[in-house]
Amino acid sequence: MNKIQGKQLVFSSTNGRRVEADFTGGQVSSDGGLLLVREVDRKLDLVRRVARHLVDERQDGKVVHTAETMLRQRVMGLIAGWEDLNDAQTLRTDPVHQVAAGSTEPLASAPTLCRFENQQARATAWAVNRELVEQFIASQQQAPAVLILDFDATDTPVHGQQENRFFHGYYDCHCFLPLYVFCGDQLLTAYLRPSNIDSAKHAAAILKLLVTRLRQAWPRTKIVFRADSGFCRDLLLSWCDRHDVKYVVGIARNERLLALAAPLLKKAERAFARTQQKQRLFTAFDYAALTWARVRWVIAKAEHTAKGSNPRFVITNIVGGAQKIYDRRYCQRGEMENRVKEQLMLFADRVSAHRWWTNQWRLLLSALAYTLLEALRRLALAGTALAQATCASVRTKLIKIGAVIVTKLTVIRLHLSSHHPLQALFCHAHAALAPP
């Protein structure tokens, strides 16, 4: 949208005074908190490392905006809540966005950014995902005793004629089916897939790559594969069994599982009828589907409430008490779903380009934005009120800060809002990110 110069907006009066507004405030930005994210990127060196792998087919001598600057411009825009390339047309002259992108000149225009995005291909996607893993490894001060790799797929609806769009019966829409891998709050993989596939498609290959690299870094670290029933596939589980990878994976209920758990289900039902209190009972037994290569251990949860029976089944090769494994290992998987939702807060669903690899690139732009915000929480907000805040909350409370910019020959000074409620927290984060 073009700037509106000089137009006066009149609002309803208050206490007998006219209320007027216009867009002639000058060097004022609504995104003063991006300076903190810039410091996070300085510590991680994330954008510079990724930029080395980007495709840039422009002719030497005609390049005004480097690939690194454009990448930082796009990532910072997503963090600040500006998802559309059209927004860049005005934001390119915002001094805060210029500083956050490492420039003091007008940034790239929307058409330039569009051409930049459409140049990216498979090699770029591979390199960015590899860098996410390297960032995770570098973030650990010592070898972890246990790493739990959470796999999950989600639907990303599409509304045009994008390449590889297919209708998915379960989600009842045309969509993509991206695969995410997290370890705790940290994102390791963001992989766009078409939706006409099994939900576990390519998961075994990605797990193998991740385990291989993580064991290179930490040979003695125990690795656990965790996922819902969509990933309960003999290929995956057999690979884990052969390579000493533990797993705790949901398994869809069926008649055979329900029959094996029937005595416990009846017991839970009788206990609820007697006490009118929610019942949760556990057992475990050996089970094998006809297509499986071996018998495996299944944990059954018999839950009965006023709404009736709610059985759940989990397959695992971890030795221990059934309830302990279910509660302490499997149930924590639900937190990963919140991390997937945060990708949408950073516009991972804006896969509206026609080309497949451009949409994969947009998914990864959101992944890079998430990586910076996660690092901001981990490095600068630990122990504060925003330590566990979502990306949307961090944006609202710490990024969207009004700032008046004064530019001089040797200094760019930002006067942040005097009425910002979290000034002390902002200063705390700044101190935590300051160079040693």
Image (tube, grey):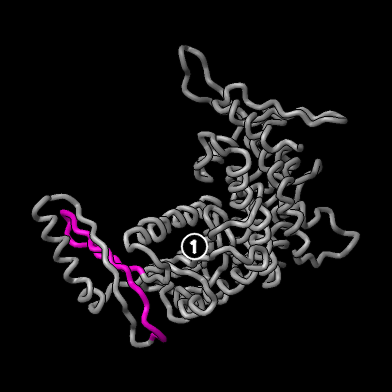
Name of the residue lying farthest toward the right: 61
Q: Is residue 57 left or right of residue 276?
A: right
**Image quarter of the C terminus:** top right
- Above or below residue 144? Residue 191 is below
Magenta region, residue range: 292-314
Q: Is residue 159 visible?
A: no
Residue 319 in the magenta stretch? The answer is no
Q: Quadrant of residue 260?
A: bottom left
Q: Which residue is mark 1?
A: 150
> Could you tell me which secondary element the residue under label 1 belongs to?
strand
Foreground: 378 or 4? 378
Q: How many marks?
A: 1
Label 1 is placed on what type of residue?
Asp
Q: Is residue 432 left or right of residue 258?
A: right
Q: Quadrant of residue 305?
A: bottom left
User: Residue at image x 51%, y 50%?
Assistant: 345
Name of the residue lying farthest toward the left: 274
Query: Could you say where residue 308 lies in the image, as x and y percent from the top left?
Result: 17, 59
User: Residue at image x 51%, y 54%?
Assistant: 344
Query: Could you say where residue 94 lies in the image, as x and y percent from the top left?
Result: 71, 39
Q: Is residue 98 left or right of residue 157?
A: right
Query: Could you say where residue 38 lies in the image, as x and y percent from the top left?
Result: 70, 43
Q: Main secondary structure of the magenta part?
A: strand
